[in-house]
Amino acid sequence: MTDPIALHKKALRAQMAERRAAAFAAPDLGQQVQAACAHIGRVLADSFGAAAQAVVLAAYMPMRSELDPLPAMQAHTGPVCVPVITGPGQALEFHRWHEGAEMMDGPFSARIPRAHDPLVPQALIVPLLAFDRRGYRLGYGGGFYDRTLQSLRAQGRVLAMGFAFDVQEAPQVPTDGNDQRLDVIVTPSGLIWPQ
């Protein structure tokens, strides 16, 4: 028997991939990226106070039509890292990144630092295909971020920031027991704090 939640997720992924691609092709893409990245600094300041600039920030190297977090990564004065997939069914590792770092292709063509310098993030900018106002996200289906957030949260406080175009909002993302909620969703138009 086919899992109805899995079918719903598959259909929503296809729909939201189209919406995201259309937003990525919009003539005001640059302004949307700058606006969304500016909100990241505000969330970090509100969440960590004076320590915000020293927080270990994880983000990602954008691919496909993902909203680009690079301006937020470049603006952050503390350590920055990006995800590295170590294997199927595993939580992500995060390796130090800086502007000009030598990069290479990792699994799924994600760009990763050539140097192996692992860090443990205190705040994550999380890519996604869809989100809802409850704080749930729909990713690509590998479960990497869900496993990672579960593991990091078991070790202590971590701030998970979904990062998306406004058009990626869904009325309700289908969820199962493995899905981890985001603490906030950051879009070009502002912040959504889940209820």
Image: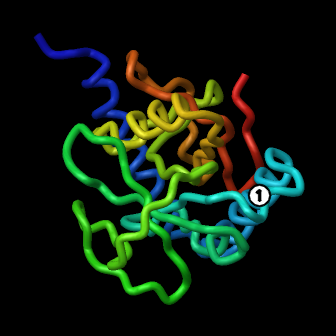
Quadrant for the N terminus in the image: top left
**Residue 107: where, in percent of width, then height?**
22, 62
**Residue 68: where, in percent of width, then height?**
54, 68
Q: Amino acid at mark 1?
A: His
From the image, tell me which residue sits under label 1: 39
Furthest-top residue in this view: 1
Q: Secondary structure at mark 1?
A: helix
Crowd around label 1: few <14 · some 14–19 · many ≥20 (10 Å): some
> Which residue lies at the image location 37% right of the left edge and 49% below the top edge?
92
> Which residue lies at the image location 39% right of the left edge and 86% below the top edge?
102
64 over 2 or under it: above or below: below
Q: Nearer the viewer, residue 116 or 82?
A: 116
- Asked whether residue 170 appears in the rendered view, the answer is no
**Residue 75: where, in percent of width, then height?**
71, 75
Quarter where residue 5 is shown: top left
Quarter where residue 162 is shown: top right
